[in-house]
Image (tube, coloured by chain):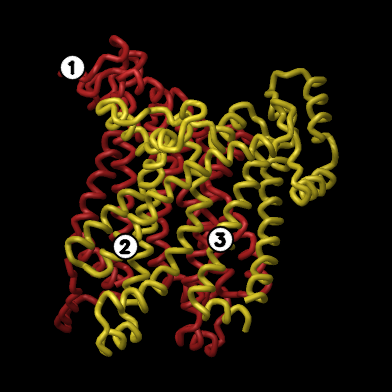
Chain colours: A yellow, B red
Amino acid sequence: MARFISRRLLLSLITLWLLTTIVFIIANVLPNDVGRTILGPFAPQETVDALNERLGTDRPIIVRYVDTILGVVTLDFGESYVTGQAVLPQLAAAIGRSAKLAGLALLITIPLAITAGLYAARRRDRPADRGIVLLGVTSSSIPEFVTGTILVVVVGVQLRLLPVLATPPPNADIPTQIRYLLMPATAMAIVYFGYIARMTRAGTIEVLQSDYTRTAMMKGLTTGQTMRRHVLRNALIPTVAVIAVQIGYLFGGIIAVEKIFNYNGMGQTMLFAAQRKDIPMLTAGAIVIGVVYMVATLAADMVMAWMNPRIRLDVER
Amino acid sequence: MDVTVTPTPVGPMAAPPVSERAQARRETLRVLVRRPAFIIGNIVVYGWILTAVLGERITPYDPFNDFFIGHAPPSPEHWMGTDRLGRDVLSRVMVGSRDVLIVAPLAAMLGVIAGTLLGLVMGFYRGAIDDVLSRIIEAFLALPVVLVALLTLVVLGSSPLVVVFVVGTLFTPIVARTVRAAVLSERQLDYVTAARLRGESGPFILSREIFPNVLGPTVVEMTVRFGYAIFTVATLSFLGVGLQPPSPDWGLTVSEEYTNMISGVWWPTLFPALAIASTVVAVNLIADTLQSVLSE
C-alpha cells in the first residue's frame, strides 16, 4: 500500500506541475501584453507599462514561469490586480463557502443516485430501469443554470417555498443556511445525479453477471446477503471514481449557479475576476481548483485500492 | 424494448453486390429508426434548425426590431410575453438557436478531429510520446472546462470563432482519451498482427485497418461532444463570455433577463431556458441511443 500511495503522489505532483504550466501558458503566453489585455486598447501606454511593472509581467517569460512554479510550491499566488491584496486568503474564504454548497449538493445526490443505479441494475431492461436511464440522460445533459432558472421560477417565485437568493442572513443557524442553499444545491445535484446513477448501474450490472455472484447465489445466499457481501463492494468502485471526478467539475458548474443565486463563493469570485480581467486571480483560482480535483481523485484512488486489492497490486507489480 | 438484430436473409445470386460495411451501416440505421428516443431527439433538433433557418419568415413578429410594451406577460398576442425592451419572446426563442447551432457543432468537430488523430497515434505507437501526452491529458482533465474557457476567453477576447477554438481545444484531450482506449483494445487483435506480418506500414494499418474499426466510438463521441458543446457554449454565454449581444442566443437571453425573475417577470428567462433544455436533452437522447445500438 505504501508503494502504491507514494507512486500515486508522485504522479499527482507531475500533474500539478503540468496543469500549472497549462494555466501559465493561457494567462501569460497567449496575450503578448498582459497589461494591455487588462486595460484594453485605449489605455495610455504609460499606464500599461506601470501595470506590467506592478504585476511583474514586464519580466522575461522564463522568469515569470519560474516565479509561478515557486509561487505554487510556497503557496504564494500573487496579488489581485483589482484589490492589490494577496489572492490566496480571498480564494480560501470563497472556497469555504463554495464547499458548503457543493457538499450539500453531493449529500443530496450521492445517496439518491446510488440507490437509483442499484435499483435500475437489478431491474435491467424493465420499465423502471428504462425510466431511470432516461432520467439520468436528461438530468445530466441540462446545464446547471437552466435547472437553476426553472427552480427559481417554479419553487421560488410561483410557489414561494424557498428563498431565491442563496446568501443567508449573517449568523444564521445551520438549518437556515441549508434552507438558503437548498435550491442552488439541488440545481447542481440534478446534473450529477445522472452521471453517478448511470455509473452505479453499469458497475452493478457487470458484477451481477460475474461468476462469483452466480456462485454466491448458487451456494444459497439470499439476494440481500449476495448484494451486501459480494456485489456492492465491487460494483461501487467505478462510482467512487466518477464521484471524485465530479467533485472537480462541480467547481465548473458552480460558477453559473452562484451567479443565478447571487452566492459569494468561488464561482462568483472567478466571475468577478473575469469581468475585471483580473488575470492573477483567475490563474490562482484555476490552479487551486485543479489541486482540489487532484486531491479528490487521489482520495478516490486510495478508496478504490482499499476496496479492491487487485488495483493496488497491479501498480506494485 | 429488446431489439433483436435478425440477420438479413441472404439474397438471390443475382442481387447487386453490397459491401459488408454498407450493409452493416444500413442494418444499424434500421435498428436506430425503431428507437423512439432517437426519433424524438432528431425531431427536436431538426425542429430548432428549421425555425432558425426560416427565422423571420415564420416568427409572429420581427425578433429584433418590433418593440411593444416591455415585460408584458404571456397573452394571446404574445404567447410567451415580451422582454425588457418589449420584443416578442416567442419570436426571439425561435431564432435563438442560430448561433449556438453553428458554434457548438464546429467546436465538437474540432475537438473530435484533433482528439481522434491524437488518440490514434497515442494508442497505436505507445512509447514515450504516449506517456508524455497521457500526463498532459491528465492535467487538462483536472481543470473544469468552463473555468479554463472563462480564463482563455478573458485573455483572448470573445468572438464566435474564439469560442469554437477554445471549446474545441478543451474537448480534444477528452476525445483523445476515449479514442486511445478504443485503439488499445483493437491493436491486440489478430487482424492487426496479420497486417503487420503482411509487412504493411504503421500509417497504413492505422488509417485503413484500425481507424474504420474505431469509427463507432468516434461517431458516438461526436454526438456526445455536440451535446456538451451546446451545454458549454450556453453556460459561457450565460456567464457573459460566450455569444455576445445582439445575438438572440438563449443562454445570453437568460443572462440578460434572469435578475427580473425575482420580481415575478419569469417569461423572458424561462422560455429560452426550456429551449436550451430541450435541445441538449434531444442531442443526448440521440447520442445515448447511438451508443447503445453501436455497442450491441
Please tell me how crowded label 1 is: few (under 14), some (14-19), or many (20+) other residues with Cα within 10 Å.
few
Protein chain holding label 1: B
Q: Which residue is rendered at x = 54% and y = 38% of the image?
A: A97
Q: Are marks 1 and 2 in contact (CB under 8 Å)?
A: no
Please tell me how crowded label 2 is: few (under 14), some (14-19), or many (20+) other residues with Cα within 10 Å.
many
Residue at numbered disc 2: A117
Q: Given the current orientation, which residue lies at the most extreme top position?
A: B69
Left or right: B135, with A152 as reference point: right
* Structural distance between the alpha carbons of marks 3 and 2: 21 Å
SS at mark 3?
A: helix
Q: Which residue is rendered at x = 64% and y = 40% of the image?
A: A92
Residue at numbered disc 1: B77
Between A211 and B166, the one lying in front of the other is A211
Residue at numbered disc 3: A297
Disc 1 residue type (three-letter)? Glu
Q: Which residue is rendered at x = 54% and y = 73% of the image?
A: A305
Q: Position of residue B278 (x, y in %)?
A: 28, 41
Disc 3 residue type (three-letter)? Thr
Confirm whether residue A71 shows in the render: yes
